[in-house]
Image (cartoon, rainbow, N blue to C red):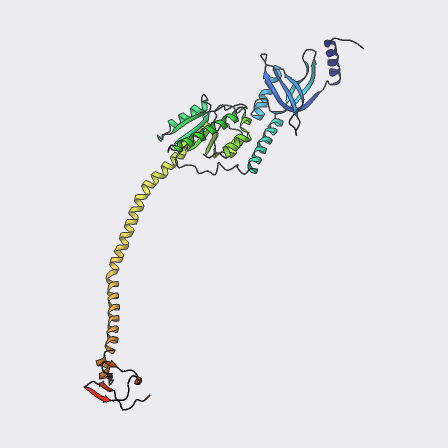
Amino acid sequence: METVTLYELNSRIRGILEDTMDQTYWVHGELSEGRQGPGGHFYGELIERDEETDTVVARARINIWARTYSILSLRFQDETGQKLRPGMKVLVKAKVSFHEAYGYALTIQDIDGTYTLGDLERRRQEILRQLEKDGIINDNKTLPLPTLLRRIAIVSSPNAAGYGDFCNQLQGNEYGFAFQTRLYTAIMQGQQAPDSIIGALQRIEEDNSVLMEHGSEPFDVVVIIRGGGAVTDLCDFDSYPLAACIAQYPVPVIVGIGHERDRTVLDFVSHESVKTPTAAAAFVIDHQAEVLAHLQDLAVRVPQMVRMRVESERQRIHRIASLLPVSVGRLHERLKHRLDMLEQRILGLNPEVLLKRGYSITKMGDKVLHNAMQVQEGDVLTTRLEHGEVLSKVICRLG
């Protein structure tokens, strides 16, 4: 058996690889590590995971030399709006290399940004579909926005320019509106951002509970802001746990994370989505201004409506007053006619009138007789006529 040094063995491996794999390959995988060294070179690791178990089934070191990296990184960011970062799915054009001291690696010559962009969009759509399946995607949007947005909880980095822009915009508003704001610090960039923002939202909810327990008013709205220039690391916000937290949040949430060319999942689940922190402040101010305009309009319209109603009622009373004598006269005539008719009917029932018409009234004692069965033989009867009375004695009863 031949004995060789490690260097000699690695040299043979290098020669075999260079002879048999001298072409380039398009390789897709997940960037698990990545950093730029002092000389401008990029060093990282590409891995492949099993789709069912999520375990790593293959890995390789990658190198992008400084000259190539300066070109590829700018083009990749222009195509995707993202910087190369761990966790991204990438499609790279690579040449297999082997070094006696450093071993096997892939030297990257090109990157297809559309592949990564497609993967990011696929993940975003998967999250949106899951939110729809869970039936929560529109929950925060359906919350009623308070009439006044005076108490505002802000989720942001304290040193971010966007936070300063938001506060300055509120404080310097042309209407002189007063706002009560409170900052809840969170990490707004990187893989820690979703958990940090969720933590800030939980603290706001806890403080709201304490405020209500003590009879104080809770926050009217929550504003999540992140400023900055170029759009980077937007995929940090495409997080199902964060999106679900905002979708189900009991207070209306306004999202303004400083992006112009793309949308994140948070834009679909928040109550309101704006492009920048300044736009978020403008939304709050405009909302107040609409309420003010409505109140000012009511201040003008209500007195006018009252005056119109008073004038209308005055005219109605005047018409009634003008019609009252005629109505009373007619009512008087109707009542007089009715009284005359009743008088005639009463007079017609007067016994004296009936006697004058030839009728008579027969009594036995004080009892007026109506039926022959009321008397017996021998009874004495008194019959009253128009003029005088007749006494008679019953001899026999007929009927």
Residue found at x 49% / y 27%: 199
Q: Split into 4 quadrants, where in the image is the C terminus?
A: bottom left
| In the image, residue 283 above or below residue 56 | below
In this view, the residue in front, 68 or 398, is 398
| In the image, residue 115 above or below residue 311 | above
Would you identify the image quadrant in which residue 293 lies?
A: top left
Q: Split into 4 quadrants, where in the image is the N terminus?
A: top right
| In the image, residue 325 above or below residue 359 | above
In this view, the residue in front, 48 or 77, is 48
- Find residue 386 and report its horizontal and vertical position in percent: 20, 85
Please identify the residue farthest to the bottom as the structure is shown.
395
- Find residue 109 and report its horizontal and vertical position in percent: 65, 19
- Find residue 232 and report its horizontal and vertical position in percent: 54, 24
Residue 323 shown left or right of residue 228 in the figure:
left
Please identify the residue farthest to the left as the structure is shown.
388
In this view, the residue in front, 261 or 103, is 103
Please indicate, yes or no, whether residue 283 appears anywhere in the rendered image: no
Residue 371 shown left or right of residue 52 in the figure:
left
Please indicate, yes or no, whether residue 164 appears anywhere in the rendered image: yes
| In the image, residue 270 above or below residue 67 | below
Residue found at x 32% / y 43%: 302
| Numbered label tally | 0
